[in-house]
Amino acid sequence: MKSNSSRKVSFDSLIACASCDWLHYRTMIERGSRASCSRCGHELYTRKPFSVDRTLAASLAGVVFLLLSLSLPFLSLSTGGISSSISILDAVGALWLSDMRWLGALSLALIALLPFVRLCLLIWVMFRLRYRLGILPSMRAAMRWAETLEPWAMAEIFMVGVVVSLVKIADLATLTVGPAFWALLGLVLTTSLISIFFCRDSVWQLLTTHSA
Amino acid sequence: MATTDNTLGITAQQAGLARCDHCGALHRLPGTENCRLCGARVQSRKHNSLQRTWAFLIVGLMAYIPANLYPIMLTKSFSGNTSDTILSGVVTLAQSGSVFVAIIIFVASVVIPVAKFVIIAGLALSLHFQWAMSEHTRHILHTITEFIGRWSMIDVFVVAVLAALIQLGAILTIEPGAGINAFALSVVFTMFSATSLDPRLIWDGVEHGE
């Protein structure tokens, strides 16, 4: 019935809601505002100011925090005159050596590997966009992977886990947090900054319009 | 927060179009395999969405049973060996006075997984049998399941941190129990289950009703 009207318009002037598939015309929105679906309220697109610059800056800071949090001492333990201090990589190594490989590998992937890969992909795409180095097809693949990896980067959940560990072991031993703990907090904060700054639809527009 | 009122009054599917899940480009159906702009696979609706959702959910549920029956953490010290399951760990924490942390663990390891099983199963059943339920309610439930699932990983990280750190031989050693592997698998599979459920199916029911 109404479907005839859509035949006349160009695909680029239309957008479908990712959550409910409802079709909308793209309209210019004010800088800093967002357009939402008129049926389900899901976000359609946003126009965030300086999105590429800010996402790049936050991702670079995130990588620095991540590398610091992996290498610096993370937790110190003392009980009955014995004390030891470990970094996250030491902890994963200890799990690996004592035959808890599965748990070690899963933790390493969720805390370090996947966040690291995601940040590197974001940095590479944002850097090339920021300095207008040209659009490569692999940048779109990189962006797809960065989006897919997002829910699997669990630094903030790990931090809650560490705090719970401190309480749980309080009767048996004294645990204190080292500088890596605060670096990890930095990573958690920069990760949430990335989700504030990143303007998904605008980045995809930049990545796709030049080649279409 | 302005909602755009420039709608065409139909879904992309009804217009014979499919949206690329990644870059948002629209494609004419049928005949499009991969997105012309970003290369991702283009599907109007996720393929076998409900079947996949059920499959992952059932595996997640199956893994959740041993996760609760077997101990997740073994503590060996000169004063004796103890083992904790998810629930006994919560009780021990609460008894030692850390009620707040006990609540965090209880929510992350029991309330969230159970709520997720119930919500996903309820959504899938309501889509299957076309139950009368507001689309907005279902939309909110779906959004919730996508966000809360990851937080169940807290207990896995707690065991990983303690097992890695507390290796003092005969004085005090903490080892992970079989339950934690099952629990981690349960969380991972329910996360897959939540992402398999295509939210657009919730709204497709609206047209059927009219």
Image (spheres, coloured by chain):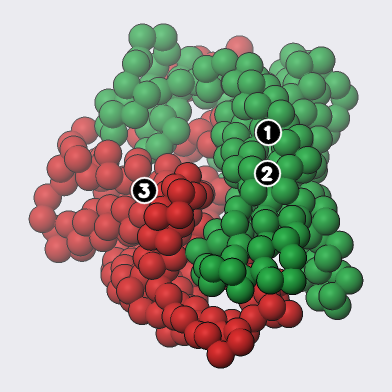
Chain colours: A red, B green
Answer whether residue A52 is visible to the viewer in this image.
Answer: yes
For this rendering, which residue is in front, A142 or A75? A75
- Residue B63 disc label: 1
Q: Residue at x 32, y 26 (%)?
A: B35
Q: Residue at x 50, y 33 (%)?
A: A16
User: Is residue A90 shown above or below B139?
Assistant: below
Spatial separation of the CA atoms under disc 2 and disc 1: 9 Å
Residue count near mark 3 (Cα–Cα under 10 Å), binned few <14, some 14–19, many ≥20? many
Query: Based on the displayed image, in which of its 4 quarters is residue A93 positioned?
Result: bottom left
- Left or right of A93, for residue A132: left
Residues marked 3 and 1, same chain: no
Query: Mark 1 — on which chain does it sit?
Result: B
Task: Name the residue beneath numbered marker 2.
Answer: B179
Foreground tag (2 vs 3): 2
Q: Residue at x 71, y 28 (%)?
A: B62
Give the residue type at disc 3: Ala
Foreground tag (2 vs 1): 2
Q: Are marks 2 and 3 in contact (CB under 8 Å)?
A: no
- Left or right of A132, for residue B27: right
Task: Name the residue beneath numbered marker 3.
Answer: A146
Give the residue type at disc 1: Ala
Query: Mark 2 — on which chain does it sit?
Result: B
Q: Are marks 2 and 1 in contact (CB under 8 Å)?
A: no
For this rendering, which residue is in front, B176 or B105? B176
- Left or right of A28, for residue A125: left
Residue count near mark 1 (Cα–Cα under 10 Å), binned few <14, some 14–19, many ≥20? many
Spatial separation of the CA atoms under disc 3 and disc 1: 29 Å
